[in-house]
Amino acid sequence: MLPAYDLVYETYGTLNAAKSNAILVCHALSGHHHVAGMYADQPKSLGWWDNLIGPGRPLDTERFFVVGVNNLGGCHGSTGPSSPNPATSKPWGADFPVVTVDDWVQAQAQLADFLGIASWAAVVGGSLGGMQALQWAIDLPQRIRHALVIAAAPKLTAQNIAFNDVARQAIITDPDFHGGHFYEHATVPRRGLRLARMLGHITYLSDDQMGEKFGRVLRNDTGAYSFGYGVEFEIESYLRAQGDKFAGFFDANTYLLMTKALDYFDPAHRHDGDLAAALKPAVAKFLVVSFTTDWRFAPSRSREIVNALLKNDQDVSYAEVASSFGHDSFLLEEPQYHAVLRAYLGRIGL
């Protein structure tokens, strides 16, 4: 339970008179509300999905009113573990309640109410964002006309849960974590966050892409073994830089909450594992997109969603995009991927 909460959001484009052209963009694990453009006073603040959202882009802001939101439990302005607990005036920390994908959908629905949007033209998301789009179609079927589920899955595999737990253990066992109340100690579990991000980043890339981008290139190839544990290979340099960057801005407790929400997501659980039964209430039309080299959320997981929808005779389109960039493909400007989204969104009636 929370006595109250704030959601930070941004909008792009203009809401039409009928309020029928709104699209909700749901973020993935480390995302937030800033999905496109940049802030005037922060020239490096490019939105995380800027290549997809804007005038003339697949999510065309000359046609659609796009809403980006930072989820409950986040660390980019929405109420989360680093926010003050009214009962103590101290940050919530580890006392912040567990949040689920269902909770996020209900909070986003309250945002829609606030904006006067009775029904989204579409809810769009990649990875954990795609799971939110799926949950929207199940929980609030009359309030969503199209669900774009990109690089997602109907639930995590045991391997994916294992990756998440190793990442969480890296954070929890950091001496600076202090049981989740590190704010009171004026410290950050930087080492744990760094390791968690490094591990996660490995799973977001494909082996082919890492090989093409870094290979086995040594930073200083002298022909002699150093037997040291510093940065020698280019891939080591890259991962450590990504880890350091992430640890500098992301909240450790938020990371724990978001990965747990991923683990718990399983709409078929309430239907004895029958995904088709879980999806039965949905009346939205679906676009499901997967990427050939995404091994964390493999195309076979997307096809599970497609097959369940087809079993119900529900309206679904599916695209399996050839890409060498692994799970991160959904964030990139892949021509085939963008063409699929552009074609699908271009047919949405307003």
Image (spheres, rainbow, N blue to C red):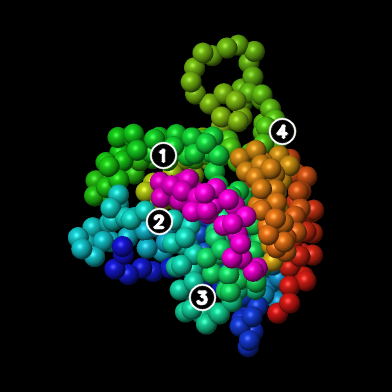
User: Which badge, 4 or 1, is on the more N-terminal residue?
Assistant: 1
Q: First in sequence: mark 2 or mark 1?
A: 2
Which mark is drawn over residue 168? 1
Left or right of 341, for residue 130? left
Q: Which mark is residue 95?
A: none
Residue 209 lies, in percent from the top left, at 70, 36
The Cα atoms of the two marked residues, 2 and 4, are separated by 35 Å
Q: Position of residue 111 (x, y in %)?
A: 48, 73
Label 2 SS: loop
Density class for disc 2 (Cα within 10 Å; few <14, some 14-19, many ≥20) is some
- Magenta part of the chain: 255-284
Q: Are marks 3 and 1 in contact (CB under 8 Å)?
A: no
Residue at numbered disc 3: 112
4 and 3 marks in contact (CB < 8 Å): no
Q: Amino acid at mark 3?
A: Ala
Q: Closest to the observer: 237 or 147?
A: 147
Q: Is residue 345 above or below residue 350?
A: above
Q: Which residue is mark 2?
A: 99
Q: Earlier in the sequence, mark 2 or mark 3?
A: 2
The secondary element bearing badge 1 is classed as helix
Label 3 CA crowd tier, 10 Å (few <14, some 14–19, many 20+): some
Earlier-in-chain disc, 3 versus 1: 3
Q: Residue furthest bottom?
A: 17
Q: Are marks 2 and 1 in contact (CB under 8 Å)?
A: no
Instruction: Determine which quarter of the picture holds residue 309.
Output: bottom right
Find residue 26 and report its horizontal and vertical position in percent. 56, 61
Q: Residues within 10 Å of mark 1 (few under 14, many from 20)?
A: many
